Image (cartoon, helix red, strand yellow):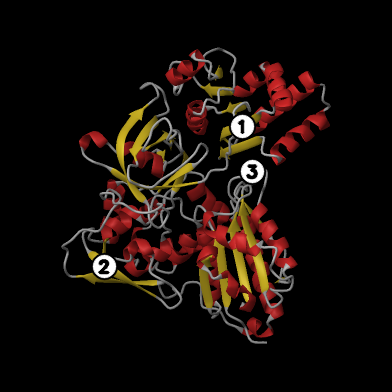
Amino acid sequence: MSIPALLILYGSQTGTAQDTAQRIAWQALRRHMQVRVSSLDDYNVANLITEPLVVFVCSTTGQGDPPDNMKNFWRFLFKKTLPVGSLCRLDCAILGLGDSSYPKFNFVAKKLHKRLVQLGATVLMPVGLADDQHDLGPDAVIDVWLTSFWQSMATLYPGFADVIPLREDEPLPPTYTFHFLESVEGQTEDCRRIPSQQPAPSRSCPFSAKLLSNRRVTDPQHFQDVRHIDFDITGSNIHFTAGDVVMMRPCNAPEDVEQFCQLLGLDPDARFTLTASPGSTVPGRLAPPCTVRYLVESYLDIGAVPRRSFFELLSTFSTNELEHDKLVEFSSAEGQEELHSYCNRPRRTALEVLADFPHTTAQLRVDYLLDLFPEIQPRSFSIASSLQAHPNRLQVLVAVVRYKTKMFQPRRGLCSTWLASLDPTKGDVYVPLWVKKGSLKFPREKDTPVIMVGPGTGVAPFRSALQERTAEDKNANVLFFGCRSESKDFYFRNEWEEMMGVGQLMLFSAFSRDQEEKVYVQHRVREKAALLWDLVANKGAYFYIAGNAKQMPTAVCDALKAAFEQEGGKSTDDAEQMLTAMETCGRFQAETWS
């Protein structure tokens, strides 16, 4: 039996699944296979019935949802009209990327496996369930899964065992070739371009919103810098409701762009075009002639913690023995603990790695930049305003991420740091953005109570909901808000007090550090057990949680179940079943992030 071409389809939200798909492709190319790599939504799913061999790599987002770039595929695949045996020619394998801190761990991969089997596909091996919470990250599962996959290939296609792979230190041809232009006139559009009229903004065609204000809302002495940011979306054709999210793609810091260009000996003002190797296409955002500065500032994710595939490719350029040996070690299965200590634990960036390996960096060819560095991925933020209260405006509440590791420089969140740096008082600033539906849905009925638990920046979607609901005369609103100190990080305090004053809101606050014993939102939920039982059991209230996914959501759920037991006389099992029933019918919803 001849060895078929391999198709690798990925569904990726943050870029991890895409990176893993590319890594599998490189391994296949080293085995002299014909390979295609595509996101699931860029692939014509109708052709799946003719494919002989496919590897699916897919992540799970939010509350068990598929990533944005596989949602069309997902809808098609689950059409009830698809014939049961329509994929009987397909051999496939499924690798899931998930996070076990979320309740629906790797839900998409598991459901995809079940559906492919229903449609007659032959699944070559058990589903791989990689876990971001593992000490060694998802690679702990991916490595073992890939070894099993290539073994199954050798069993299924006997000729495959006779293939002699390329050496690991032999570089593969680059996916793209750079063609530098002599003229340096003209400017590439960048993230601060002037907006224009356009239909429904999207990932491929964002709207450049004018930044109106960027205000710190925490006390200057408070350790956490949190920003309330206001955008003008006039003429954007953007519509949103409470619970929706805004997407933004950040830029790298100017000093990082400068250092990168110096390390690689690149002229930031040089202009180029790209050509793609067979089976690949030039990324849409790099289609016109670009400057190196635009590429590094707006496209290459040089500030991310590099994945193992980064070291695998980098090692092929190294001619310095010491650097080469270390890069090979980081690329090996045996060296993953060492790599984790070097990169993941201290959150060392790809740019810092290049500085640590200067001889190898000097050998790096520009044609490999797009193979080495992933594209900067968009970040999502809960919208913190309502169009009914603020027409033609979109507001967000952003905590600026900054923390220390053993690295000399503090670690910074790319998007939050970039947003915090934008100053509209020094000139017009435009930020490309688009909106997508969020997971939180609020009841339409006027008299249905809504209970919201939103500590910290988790309160953002509830500000949007409260502005929307009070504008519609829906005044049965309860908010549990938590922060460290009443005087330092009590977001939107004046707004809540105004709503309370006119009977539109009941507010219960928890200030964890304002007394000796820490008090959190879950404590307030327990204290208000009688009120919550009445609202849920007798008035059909909806219950919402938004915020950090660590301990808070579980603690709040436990407090709510305790209210069912204490005030409703429910057993522990009955309280659990009651909460599950609420979730099933949409009366309990959570939007959390890690």
Using residue 111 as the reference point, say whether residue 257 is left or right of it.
Answer: left
Residue 556 % position (x, y): 65, 28
Q: In front of the other: label 1 or label 3?
A: 1
The amino acid marked with disc number 2 is: Phe
- Quadrant of the snapshot with the C terminus: top right
Query: What kind of element bears circle 3?
Result: loop
Q: Nearer the viewer, residue 441 or 526?
A: 441
Q: CA distance from mark 2 to mark 3?
A: 43 Å
Q: Nearer the viewer, residue 549 or 11?
A: 11
Q: Nearer the viewer, residue 290 or 312?
A: 290
Q: Quadrant of residue 407?
A: top left
Using residue 505 as the reference point, say whether residue 579 is left or right of it.
Answer: right
The amino acid marked with disc number 3 is: Tyr
Q: CA distance from mark 1 to mark 3?
A: 30 Å
Identify the residue at horizontal 31%, vertical 59% (top origin): 295
Residue 399 % position (x, y): 43, 33
Contact between marks 2 and 3 (CB within 8 A): the answer is no
Residue ID for mark 1: 445
Disc on the earlier residue, 2 or 3: 3
172 is higher (above) or lower (below) than 385:
below
The amino acid marked with disc number 1 is: Glu
Residue ID for mark 2: 272
Residue ID for mark 3: 102
20 is higher (above) or lower (below) than 132:
below
271 is higher (above) or lower (below) than 222:
below
Query: What kind of element bears circle 1?
Result: loop
